[in-house]
Image (cartoon, rainbow, N blue to C red):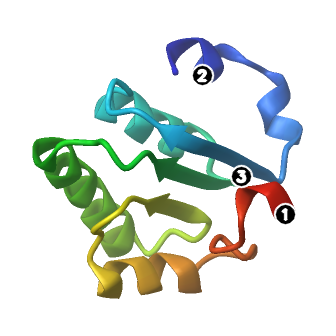
Amino acid sequence: MGNILKLQNLKNLEWFLFNDIPESLNIRDLSAFLKNYKDLEITFRFNENISDEYKNQLDALIDEIIESEVFGRHIRYDGQEEKKLKILNSRSKYDVNEDINDV
């Protein structure tokens, strides 16, 4: 993620999607990425093997996103609280629920 943050061409993108992310992705790096690219629609889908501790960290980040009322930020993982997922979905320009192979 640190190397991705250094890329200059990302400023030209409209939508950035990461799929099947392992919990080795540092939450602070993820948060920095979200803050650095304010005009970019960003979707992060985590794999099904992430721990409850990691899910708690993601939930804290999701709460921060919801409270900030920023649009275009979507984080998804198995077992996620449905209410929070619906809020994130409602703030997205893209259908973040479609199959990745359809994108």
In the figure, is residue 59 to the left or right of 70? left
The residue located at (31%, 73%) in the rendering is 67
Q: Where on the picture, by quarter, is residue 91? A: bottom right
Q: What is the number of the mark on residue 78?
A: none
67 vs 24, nearest the viewer = 24
Crowd around label 2: few <14 · some 14–19 · many ≥20 (10 Å): some
Task: Tell me the amino acid under the disc marked 1.
Answer: Asp
Q: Which residue is mark 1?
A: 102
- Secondary element at tag 3: loop
Crowd around label 1: few <14 · some 14–19 · many ≥20 (10 Å): few
Crowd around label 3: few <14 · some 14–19 · many ≥20 (10 Å): some
Give the image location of residue 24, x and y in percent. Answer: 33, 24
User: In the image, is residue 33 above or below residue 91?
Assistant: above
The residue located at (40%, 33%) in the rendering is 22
In the figure, is residue 9 to the left or right of 43? right
Task: Tell me the amino acid under the disc marked 2.
Answer: Leu
Q: Which residue is mark 2?
A: 5
The residue located at (65%, 70%) in the rendering is 96
CA gap, disc 2 and disc 3: 13 Å
- Secondary element at tag 1: helix
Quadrant position of the C terminus in the picture? bottom right
Q: Which residue is mark 3?
A: 40
CA gap, disc 3 and disc 1: 20 Å
The answer to whether residue 103 of the structure is visible from this angle is no
Give the image location of residue 77, x and y in percent. Answer: 39, 59
In the figure, is residue 65 to the left or right of 4? left
38 vs 41, nearest the viewer = 41
Task: Tell me the amino acid under the disc marked 3.
Answer: Leu
CA gap, disc 1 and disc 2: 26 Å
Give the image location of residue 88, x and y in percent. Answer: 48, 76
In the figure, is residue 60 to the left or right of 93? left
- Pointer 1 or 2: first along the chain: 2
